[in-house]
Image (tube, rainbow, N blue to C red):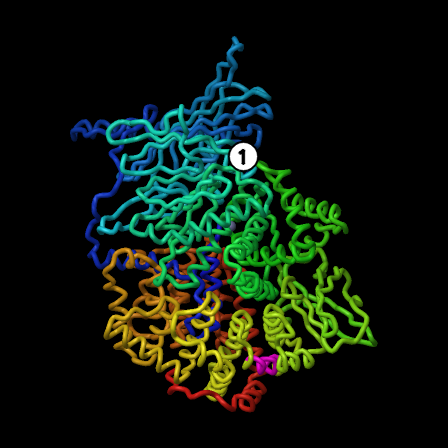
Amino acid sequence: MRGTRIMADRAYRKITQDLADPRDFPAGSSDSELEIFHDLDMEEDGGRDRMPRGGGKYEMMEDSAPPPKSVSKITAVIIVSCVVLAIIIIAIVVAVYVPSGVPYTSIRLPLNVIPQTYDIFLHPNLTTEEFAGTVTIQLKVVQETSSVIVHMKDLKFTRTPEITPVVSKRDTVTQDIRVKDTAPINDLEMMYLELSQELQVGMLYNLKMSFSGQLNSEGLDGFYKSVYKAANGEERVIATTHFEPTAARKAFPCLDEPELKANFTMKIVRDKMHKALFNMPLVEPPLVASTNYGDNLMQDNFQTTVKMSSYLVAFIVCDFDFRSNTTTTGKEVRVYAPSDTIDEVEVALSAGTKILEYYEEYFSVPYPLPKQDMVAIPDFAAGAMENWGLITYRLTALLYKEGVTSERNKQWVCIVVAHELAHQWFGNLVTMEWWNDLWLNEGFASYVEYIGTNHTYPEWKMLDQFIYLTTQEALVEDSLSNSHPISVPVTDPNEINELFDGISYDKGASIIRMLENFLTPDVFRQGLTDYLTRHQYGNARTDDLWEAMTKSSETNGEKVNVKEVMDTWTLQMGYPVVTLSRKGGNITATQERFLIYPEGEPSTEFTSPFGYKWQIPLTFITSDNSKQETKLMKEDTETVLKGNPTWIKGNVDVAGFYRVNYDSWDAIIHTLKTNHNEFTSADRTGLIDDVFHFGRSGHVSQITALDMSLYLKNETDYVPTVTAISNLKYIGKVLLGDENGYKLYKDYILQQFDHLISNVGWEDVGDHLQKFMRSSVLSLGVSYGHEDATKKSLEIFNKWKTDSEEVSANLKDTVYYSGIRNNGNDAWDFVWDKYVNETIPSEKKRSCMLSPRLKILLSYHICLFVIRYLAWSLDEKKIRSQDTVSVVSQIAGNPFRGRELVWDFVTKNWQTFLDRYSTGSFEMDNLITAMTTGFSERSDLEKIETFFAANPDAGSGTRAIKQAIEAVNMNVAWVEAHKEEVIDWLSQNAQNPPRMVRDRL
Ligand SMILES: [Zn+2]
């Protein structure tokens, strides 16, 4: 799964470093506006009702309950009375029965029976939003038992389940067995089936269950409905699924644990105007793929899947179109989308086909299914989901429209496609035994997505971008005392959602990249192939992968005990800073845990089994030798090199997950200033990010970091530039309260980046990274009042306003922002009108097109509307509950007192937020970060501490409170310790800023 909420958080953190700078909105961050826009749509319609929905009339299948018939009033009263009486009797029976009848309390299934196959029949009705079905599970008995427990949630049996032994023709005596009773074990989302006899070990039994349920219209998991508007304005309903981690049980009774793999066969009844999709294609002749199923209905019969976990099953009933392509190995790739957006699937289709071909070669294991469908789902909680052979996506993660969607969205589409395709092997073919190894699934896919994208678009320099987008994010998150280890035990399924976080994805990806670099790509790939081959169609633990890697290293030369190395990165939180120092002709390396705020309260939640020491694959180059050397550092202090080079640079190309400090910063800075190309672009990126974080943690003086930034006048590469901007913005953020200091800071920024701002031009031309660079530095220029950039952006804004000349997709943020910032309320009203009166339907519902407008509206001007919008954020009629935190976060980033506004709003409504989100996985975290970030005054700190002392428990956000307090403490300490010297330094070094417009901040 690729989390959009995680991306939103990432985008948020990057954005809030930005003050008023609308650059770098990774595409995933924009998703929430889609739903916001849905709501605005509805309001425009005055809540008027929708056009008829697709979906046929509801015809029950043979063995489910009959449909309700129309009845007279008297009959109805009689029936109701009987039903009530029956319910009372059943309730009494159940009340007596349940306490003694359900002797089961474990959250895991008993594993006395193992599912072999599932035969599923489903009839969803898109009009009534109900579905009915039958599932026959073939069970193999491995332990004597007289009961069977299955997972089941929000479903009810429509008749008593039946169990029959599977007998061969030669068997003369069959066991007479039946399901005696059923009772829900509600807290565990299980159903207990008591049998009349014991099941016999070694035998196979068919357990047949008929059930019915409602399409989920509240949440976006299980079997749920999604709604979209067709080009003609008609509202269309589709039915789709999302099961990871534990929602298959909401669509059909099953044994819903990843280890219990089985073969699934599916039959779906659908309206003739619809298509049904499943993990596998329809059956082929001589079997019949589709058969008539009564009036205007068809039954589609699908091929049986390979052995797979229940959370990867998926099916969809929709009216979408598709485009298709075939890989060189003959696998059909199709991309499905609503018909008016079908032209926008080409990027995903072409990248998907190439990446699928490449992965077959990369993993040296063929893709085992005959097809790969990728489907754009209008309502989708995550970013995408890797269901085997039927991957589902948010619209923004799959659709790209040339000239309308930004270049960043295009990259996002490729990354998400590459991520989900990586899971087809790593996750689907070989699956984690239990959810505690989820980090490996996600960390792995989050790294391989870059390898896949890099293969398709080598000019995008994805591995350099990986440093900025992934490693740096994880280094920041994991530098707090209150982080957590990657690998945490999880027993309760309710805790599984907590595992989908930045540490699992970003740190997981970073340490896997480090391992690949350490073992060498060939050894890594060989280990991977062995692991996938050995465990295919089965399950494995993280240790099994380490074992395969160890063997591969042994076969290829030097044996590395991979488990011993990797355990130090997965079982303890944090990461080391390695200090390289020259002494007596030797260079020694010393390691200690890196903490961004060493004075912070130590975590009480986790301790380290290794005393915060790591086995570090230490790489370095020196001024005398540009060839990379590698040493596995295990001790606190080790000699790594004899000699006395002018400088040594560790963690070559930032392939490792650690920071490096030097006693030779002066020599490094000197080299950067005289010839920065002596270091690769990736190495410069690492030097900048490390020195600025050391300036904050106290490992070096803040002045050393600023001195390094003087070289930036000569920097022209994208990744070091945006890394520097993002680090310098931290200084801007904490100087915001000091008028003179902040002015000097802006002078300095514009002076150092003027060579880029003035030269990148406003034409949307050049390659991918030139477009990224242009949007980043122009928005920086406009945000900080660069006169020429401001003039030009206003010219473009006014042309848009007066001549309707479209603004290029990559510069929309910058241009809208400039218009609003410099032209005030009129411009704001104009952008707002454009936003609500967009007339082209396909454009209107596209979040990627419209998000810059709404984002800018919320972010860069405080007026009554923004205050009203904040109030709306808790009104579910206006803003979907799943989008509330995104709206609040966006407003918190508004430099015109947005964070104060949000603080007051959230603290006043704290209980409502708690009620809604404290059991979710990302929302409380994101909310707490949003409401506290950027505060740097002692009075702010006191206010925050007081509030959380009175409200210490935030459910899944409890750790985020500690992290937030730690971060604000750090800001306050930084301001108190460094403000004066930094202002002093800036006043000496910001001597030649370009001309600026009058400051309105
Ligand atoms: Zn994933």
- Give the quarter of the image for residue 427: top right
Q: Toward the viewer: 549 or 871? A: 549
* 981 left or right, relative to 582: left
402 in relation to 91, above or below: below
Q: Is-magenta flag for residue 706?
A: yes
Start and end of the magenta stretch?
A: 705-712
Check disc 1 and report the residue beneath it.
Answer: 261
* 479 left or right, relative to 583: left
Q: Secondary structure at mark 1?
A: loop
* 482 left or right, relative to 420: right
Q: Position of residue 888 (x, y in %)?
A: 39, 65
For this orientation, the residue located farthest to the right is 584
Query: What secondary structure characterizes most of the magenta part?
Result: helix
Q: Toward the viewer: 61 or 255? A: 61
Q: Is-magenta flag for residue 672?
A: no
| Residue sitting at x 49%, y 19% | 196
Q: Position of residue 537 (x, y in %)?
A: 57, 36
Q: Quadrant of the C terminus?
A: bottom left
From this viewpoint, is residue 88 visible? no
664 in relation to 983, above or below: above
Q: Toward the viewer: 801 or 132? A: 801
| Residue sitting at x 29%, y 27% | 292
296 in relation to 324, above or below: above
From this viewpoint, is residue 705 visible? yes
Q: Position of residue 668 (x, y in %)?
A: 67, 78
Q: Residues within 10 Å of mark 1 (few under 14, many from 20)?
A: many
Count the marks. Answer: 1
For this orientation, the residue located farthest to the top is 172
Specify the amino acid type for callout 1: Lys
Q: Position of residue 15 (x, y in %)?
A: 45, 69
